[in-house]
Image: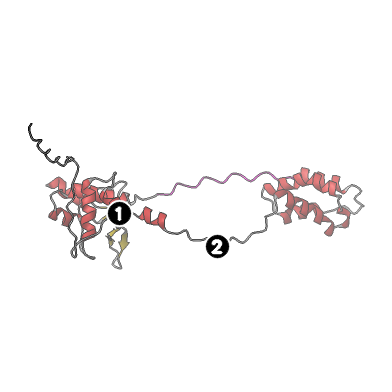
Amino acid sequence: MTDKQPSAPARAKTRHSSGVTHVNEPHHDNFTVVGNHLAQHSELSLVAIGLALHIQSLPKGTPIGIKVLAAKFPEGEIRIAAALRELEEHGYLARPRERLQSGQVTTRTISYNRPRAVVAAAAPATPKPEAVPKAPAPSGKGKATELLAGLRAHDSRLLLTERDVIRLAPAVSEWLERGVPPTAVVRTLTTGLPQDPIKHPAAFLQHRLTAQLPPRLPAAPPRPALYRPSPLQTCDGCERAFRAPHPGRCRDCRTCAEAA
């Protein structure tokens, strides 16, 4: 009878993965904190992500012009200029143009560690002051009825019933819509009244409103189209401001490139 050999211990199963393995050491100085919204941005190119990381790591006041960046990295001015435009479009960079006291236009660069759209969405909404309710403006028909009802103050013979006021209101509204001031309408209806008693004031006013109706004002001539200059752009070569319909290079930089 043979002795039973003890079974060998089972080997630990190892899992092989092709994914990344992190070896993280803590940083105590000389480091920059970057959000995953930038590091893992799905719409930015890797050049733009790397350039944003570099810009955020620089001290305040460090020049980051296109020529300065091209002298540091191998991408070249064209790729760096395109990456800067990507960062502008996604809210990580702003390059506002400012006019100096000398009259020269310069470009100021602002770097955002969070996109401006995300910051605006996270900010609490500012409560709007309660609007003071305004009294509703009287409509054209309301003005017409008020005008007709007030004619008796000019001459008691122009006393109208409520039914007559409602019936004549559209005719007065037509005068008002043609640009005649209410005072001119009242003057037309109350000037040169006959000396005899007015037996039917509504019919009398109806006749004047119809017979003396002025023509409509002619249409105003169209305004000439205003000339709008092209927007200011930042030159991809020298970063000076120039006017052009699309981003690119200024005339001097284009001339130098053609000569080269």
Residue 156's quadrant in the figure?
Answer: bottom right
Is 139 in front, or is 12?
12
Residue 92, disc: 1
Horizontally, residue 225 falls left or right of residue 190, namely left
Does the magenta-highlighted stretch encompass residue 222? Answer: yes
Which residue lies at the image location 71% right of the left edge and 47% below the top edge? 175
Magenta region, residue range: 212-227
Whole-percent x, y for residue 86 in the image:
28, 48
Quadrant of the image for the N terminus?
A: top left
Residue 239, disc: none
Which residue lies at the image location 67% right of the left edge and 58% below the top edge? 135
Q: Which residue is mark 2?
A: 129
Q: Which comes before the other along the chain, label 2 or label 1?
A: 1
Horizontally, residue 175 falls left or right of residue 260, namely right
Majority SS type along the magenta span: loop
Does the magenta-highlighted stretch encompass residue 101? Answer: no
> Which type of secondary structure does the marked residue at label 1 adopt?
loop
Whole-percent x, y for residue 73 in the image:
14, 52
